[in-house]
Image (tube, helix red, strand yellow):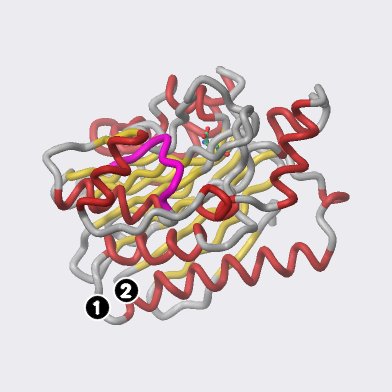
């Protein structure tokens, strides 16, 4: 048994703003990333490699708020965060506030595999990247006109649709179970549009936006990061399974529909357990998501089905 689930962000995304053409673009992008991860698992590869390949694919696609399509900070820059975790060893790696790394998830994995640390930030993370042979990309690599327009709307004080709704949508993540029975999770994001003061969200925080433990499940979250940190979302879901004996779906639903709303936290999570059970739940209008279990067809959805 093996399986994989991915997300491309959750939030308020009015259907009226989603043209049929745009929806097709998103579906194709999710299908491509799912295929990239699934191919690894089908070839007998590890869950760690599968989540890495799926997330790299999403980071390279300007549709998503991660890697190339990352949102802009208040100062017009891009600060990227990512984390990865190996459920078999509980090893983890994370980077935050990087500005010249094309694929932050690969750097997070390198931190996990080739450093004595779990989390590196900013210029230090990039110095480490250089020491490991990463190429730095110019800041202009992250420029996309649509993200720039979103920043301009927020700077102009448009708090209607934008500020907490469209502004952060597009964080990406993946969770996988491999044939050997091991779990892994990965999450990557540009954070919130217009963020200031080197703000860091939940995505790179182990236990908040990302967690994997073979004794319970692997989780990647997306949503209003400040709340997800306070609710320790990813670890909470794992703990409900491990200590509370909850099945995966119940653990996920309790956190997404009870814990988060109690704090006004909007968003969702994807999760997978050792039986290959997959849960993809969100309390927002939609969540870009896709999943595929061994030998079965891919499922791709955006709104509630
Ligand atoms: N959780 C991300 C953050 O707060 C944003 C998102 O998932 O939409 O940085």
Q: Which residue is found at the position 84% from the left and 60% from the top?
A: 19
Q: Which residue is mark 2?
A: 41
Could you tell me how far apart the alpha carbons at marks 1 and 2 are, in whole angstroms? 5 Å
Residue visible at 29% across and 32% down in the picture:
239
Left or right of 57 on screen, residue 76: right
Query: Relative to the observer, which residue lies in front, 272 or 91?
Result: 91
For disc 1, the marked residue is 44
Where, by quadrant of the figure, is residue 115 drawn?
A: top left
- Where the C terminus falls, by quadrant? bottom right
Query: What residue is rendered at 59% in x and 41% in y?
Result: 282
**Residue 143, image x, y percentages:** 63, 50
Which secondary structure lies at badge 2?
helix
Q: Position of residue 152 (x, y in %)?
A: 77, 34
The overriding secondary structure of the stretch rendered in magenta is strand
Q: In front: 244, or 9?
A: 9
> Which quadrant holds residue 75?
top right
Q: Which residues are magenta?
A: 94-101
Asked whether the residues under the numbered discs 1 and 2 touch, taking CB atoms below 8 Å apart as contact, a structural biologist would say yes
Between residue 276 and residue 222, name the one nearer to us: 222
Q: What secondary structure is found at the residue carrying circle 1? A: loop
Name the quadrant containing residue 102.
bottom left
Residue 95 on the magenta span = yes
Residue 20 is marked as none
């Amino acid at each position: 048994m093996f399986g994989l689930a991915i997300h491309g962000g959750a939030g308020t995304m009015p259907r009226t703003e989603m043209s049929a053409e745009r929806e097709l673009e998103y579906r194709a992008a999710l299908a491509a990333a799912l295929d990239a991860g699934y191919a690894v698992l089908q070839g007998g590869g590890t869950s760690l490699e599968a989540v890495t390949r799926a997330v790299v694919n999403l980071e390279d696609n300007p549709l998503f708020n991660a890697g190339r399509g990352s949102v802009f900070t208040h100062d017009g820059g891009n600060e990227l965060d990512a984390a990865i975790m190996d459920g078999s060893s509980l090893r983890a790696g994370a980077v935050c506030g990087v500005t010249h790394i094309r694929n932050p998830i690969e750097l997070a994995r390198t931190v996990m595999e080739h450093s004595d640390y779990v989390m590196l930030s900013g210029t230090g993370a990039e110095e480490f990247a250089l020491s490991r042979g990463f190429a730095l990309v110019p800041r202009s690599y992250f420029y996309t006109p649509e993200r720039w327009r979103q920043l301009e709307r927020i700077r102009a004080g448009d708090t209607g649709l934008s500020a907490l709704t469209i502004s952060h949508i597009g964080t990406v993540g993946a969770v996988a179970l491999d044939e050997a029975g091991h779990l892994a999770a990965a999450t990557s994001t540009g954070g919130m549009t217009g963020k200031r003061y080197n703000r860091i969200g939940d995505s790179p925080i182990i236990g908040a936006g990302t967690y994997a433990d073979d004794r319970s499940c692997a989780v990647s979250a997306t949503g209003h990061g400040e709340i997800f940190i306070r609710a320790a979302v990813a670890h909470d879901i794992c703990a409900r399974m491990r200590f509370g004996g909850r099945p995966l779906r119940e653990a996920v639903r309790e956190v997404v529909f009870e814990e988060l709303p109690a704090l006004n936290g909007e968003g969702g999570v994807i999760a997978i357990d050792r039986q290959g059970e997959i849960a993809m739940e969100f309390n927002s209008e939609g969540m870009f998501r896709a999943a595929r279990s061994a030998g079965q067809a891919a499922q791709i959805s955006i709104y509630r089905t």
